[in-house]
Image: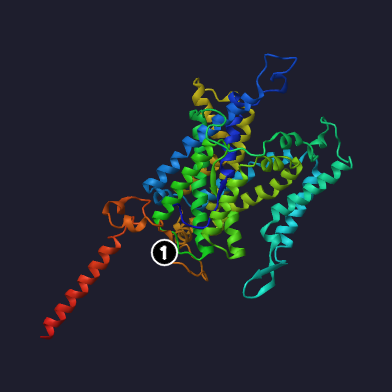
C-alpha cells in the first residue's frame, strides 16, 4: 500500500546524528562506571534502567517526530516541500551525515587498526576491483536441466564478504593469542570472544513487542532533534523512489504514490520507535543498486525477503551472533560506508554550475558551519544558558546536529542569494523529478503499477477520493467508468451530427 516499488526500508543514518546529539546533553550523558550499582556501591545506579531510560527517550522522540512524515504524506505537501529544496540544500544536508560520524568510525577502529585496515582493503577490493568478476554457479530448470550461470558475487555482497574475512582473521588472532586476553588491554576489543556473553545469554526465540523497554518518553528538545532526521529521510526517500522506478522499468511515480510512500515511511518509523529499535527507517539506496545489477525488480522478491527478516528477528541467537563481531571490523566498515554516504550527498552537485562562485560559497560555507558549530557546542554546553532549561536543551540538540545546521544554511542561502534557476541546478533537478527518466531508460510496466491492489477499482467509484492526496485516484478528472461513458457519449453525438449533416 506504499509507493508500490521494489524498495526496502531499514534503519537510517539520518537518525544517528540527532540521537548522538540528544545523548550528549547533560541529562542523558552516560554515567561513569563508578556510579553503577556494585558490591562497593549498593546504592548506585541500576545498569538496565540507565540504558532503558535513554532508549525510551529516543523511542518517544522518533514516534512523535515521525508524525511529521504522516502529515507531509497525507496532506500532499511533498510538492511544496520540493519546490524550495534544491541540490545546494540536499548536498550539505546528506554529506554532513557521513562527515560528522568520523569520530565514531575512528573510535571503533582504534582497538586494532590492523584488523580495521584489513576490513577496509577487503571492502575496496570486493566493491571496486573485483566488481566485474562473475563467479560461476550451477543452476537447474525443468527445460534445460543443469546449467551454469555467472553471478557478480563481489558486487552484490562486498559488505558481507568483507565482514566474514575480517571476522575470520580476528578469530585466528584470538585462538593464537596474538590479541591480548587482558580485558584492560586496548586490543582486547578485537577478539572474537569480546562479547561472547551476549551470544550465550541471548534467548533462542524471542518475539519483540511495542513498549518492551517501558513506556516511551519524549521531550521537546529530543523531538526537535529527531525531526531533522525525519526531514532528511523524506528527501532521501523521494530521490530513491525516482531512482528505483528508473531501475525497475516503471514509469515515474505520480504524486499520489509519492505521498503514499512518505506516509507509509512515517508509519514504519512509528513502529520502529514503538518496538524500541532505537532508530527510524528510510529507503535503502543499496537495494536500488542491487536491482540494477540483478535486473530483478519484483515486488514478490521484496515481500518474501521481508518475511525472512521478520522470522530471523525472532531468533535471539541470530542477533547475538552479529553482536560478537569485533569492534575494529565495524570501525573499518564504517570508514567505507560513511565515506559513501558523504559522496552520495556531494553527488547532488552534478546538477549545479560548479564554476559559479555563488554555488561554491554556499556549499563550502554550509558544510564548514555544519562541522564547526557542533564541535564547539559539544565542548561548551554551559555556554548555552537562556535561563530556561528546556530551551537550552533544544538549542544544544539543534546546534549539535550537523546535518540540520548545514541543511538550514544551504537552504537559506540558496533561496536568498540571487542566482538563475539553471545556475542553481533547479532546471535539471526539477526535470529529473518530473520525468524521472534518463536517456536510454525503458518503461516496461504500466502506470497502473502504482495502484493499490483490490482497492483502486472501488475508490474510482467515489468522487471524494479524487481529493485525497494519497489515493490512487488523486487529481483525476473523473473515475475510469465515467471517462468511458463520456467517450462513448462523445462518439455517439458526433456520429449523429455527421449523419444529420450528410442527410
Does residue 67 lie above or below 361 as drawn? above
Residue 56 can be seen in this image: yes
Name the residue at the front extreme.
142
Name the residue at the bottom extreme.
503
Q: Position of residue 487 (x, y in %)?
A: 24, 70
**Residue in the picture at 54% in, 22% down:** 385
Does residue 320 lie above or below 295 as drawn? above
Q: Is residue 92 left or right of residue 420?
A: right
Q: Nearer the viewer, residue 452 or 439?
A: 452
Q: How is the image coloured?
A: rainbow
Label 1: how many Cα within 10 Å (few below 14, some 14–19, many 20+): few
Dividing the picture into quarters, in which one does residue 501 lie?
A: bottom left
Q: Is residue 482 left or right of residue 1?
A: left
Q: How many dots with numbers?
A: 1
Q: Position of residue 81 (x, y in %)?
A: 42, 48
Image quarter (top left, top right, bottom left or bottom right) of the C terminus: bottom left
* Label 1 sits on residue: 447
**Residue in the picture at 45% in, 57% down:** 421
**Residue in the picture at 51% in, 28% down:** 217
Q: Is residue 128 left or right of residue 5?
A: right
Q: Secondary structure at mark 1?
A: helix
Q: Nearer the viewer, residue 365 or 232?
A: 232
Residue 83 can be seen in this image: no
Q: Position of residue 341 (x, y in %)?
A: 62, 50
Q: Position of residue 168 (x, y in %)?
A: 80, 48
Amino acid at each position: 500500500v506504499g509507493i508500490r516499488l521494489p524498495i526496502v526500508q531499514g534503519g537510517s543514518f539520518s537518525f544517528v546524528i540527532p540521537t548522538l546529539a540528544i545523548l550528549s546533553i547533560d541529562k542523558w550523558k552516560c554515567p561513569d562506571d563508578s556510579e553503577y550499582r556494585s558490591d562497593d556501591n549498593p546504592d548506585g545506579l541500576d545498569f538496565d534502567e540507565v540504558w532503558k531510560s535513554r532508549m525510551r527517550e529516543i523511542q518517544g522522540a522518533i514516534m512523535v517526530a515521525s508524525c511529521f512524515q504522516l502529515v507531509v504524506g497525507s496532506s500532499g505537501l511533498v510538492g511544496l516541500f520540493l519546490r524550495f529544496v534544491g541540490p545546494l540544500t540536499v548536498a550539505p544536508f546528506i554529506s554532513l551525515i557521513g562527515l560528522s560520524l568520523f569520530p565514531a568510525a575512528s573510535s571503533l577502529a582504534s582497538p586494532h587498526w590492523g584488523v580495521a585496515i584489513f576490513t577496509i582493503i577487503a571492502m575496496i577490493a570486493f566493491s571496486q576491483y573485483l566488481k566485474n568478476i562473475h563467479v560461476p554457479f550451477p543452476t537447474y530448470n525443468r527445460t534445460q536441466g543443469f546449467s551454469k550461470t555467472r553471478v557478480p558475487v563481489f558486487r552484490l555482497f562486498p559488505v558481507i564478504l568483507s565482514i566474514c574475512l575480517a571476522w575470520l582473521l580476528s578469530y585466528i588472532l584470538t585462538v593464537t593469542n596474538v590479541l591480548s586476553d587482558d580485558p584492560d588491554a586496548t586490543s582486547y576489543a578485537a577478539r572474537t570472544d569480546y562479547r561472547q556473553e551476549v551470544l550465550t545469554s541471548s534467548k533462542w526465540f524471542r518475539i519483540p513487542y511495542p513498549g518492551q523497554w517501558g513506556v516511551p518518553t519524549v521531550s521537546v528538545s529530543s523531538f526537535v532533534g529527531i525531526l531533522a532526521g525525519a526531514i532528511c529521510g523524506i528527501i532521501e526517500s523521494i530521490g530513491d523512489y525516482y531512482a528505483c522506478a528508473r531501475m525497475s522499468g516503471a514509469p515515474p511515480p505520480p504524486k499520489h504514490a509519492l505521498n503514499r510512500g512518505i506516509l507509509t515511511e512515517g508509519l514504519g518509523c512509528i513502529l520502529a520507535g514503538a518496538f524500541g529499535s532505537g532508530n527510524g527507517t528510510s529507503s535503502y539506496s543499496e537495494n536500488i543498486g542491487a536491482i540494477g545489477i540483478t535486473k530483478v525488480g519484483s515486488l514478490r522478491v521484496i515481500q518474501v525477503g521481508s518475511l525472512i527478516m521478520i522470522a530471523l528477528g525472532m531468533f535471539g541467537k541470530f542477533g547475538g551472533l552479529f553482536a560478537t563481531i569485533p569492534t575494529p571490523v565495524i570501525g573499518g566498515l564504517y570508514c567505507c560506508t560513511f565515506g559513501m554516504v558523504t559522496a552520495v550527498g556531494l553527488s547532488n552537485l552534478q546538477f549545479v554550475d560548479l564554476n559559479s562562485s555563488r554555488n561554491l560559497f554556499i556549499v563550502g560555507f554550509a558544510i564548514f558551519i555544519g562541522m564547526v558549530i557542533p564541535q564547539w557546542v559539544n565542548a561548551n554546553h554551559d555556554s548555552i544558558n537562556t535561563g530556561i532549561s528546556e530551551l537550552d536543551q533544544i538549542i544544544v540538540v539543534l546546534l549539535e546536529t550537523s546535518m540540520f545546521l548545514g541543511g538550514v544554511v544551504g537552504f537559506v542561502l540558496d533561496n536568498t542569494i540571487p542566482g538563475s534557476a539553471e545556475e542553481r541546478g533547479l532546471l535539471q533537478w526539477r526535470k529529473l523529478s518530473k520525468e524521472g527518466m534518463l536517456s536510454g531508460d525503458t518503461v516496461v510496466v504500466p502506470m497502473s503499477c502504482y495502484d493499490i491492489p483490490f482497492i483502486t477499482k472501488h475508490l474510482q467509484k467515489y468522487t471524494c477520493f479524487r481529493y485525497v492526496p494519497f489515493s490512487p485516484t488523486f487529481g483525476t478528472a473523473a473515475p475510469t467508468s465515467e471517462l468511458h461513458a463520456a467517450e462513448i457519449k462523445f462518439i455517439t453525438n458526433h456520429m449523429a451530427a455527421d449523419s444529420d449533416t450528410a442527410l
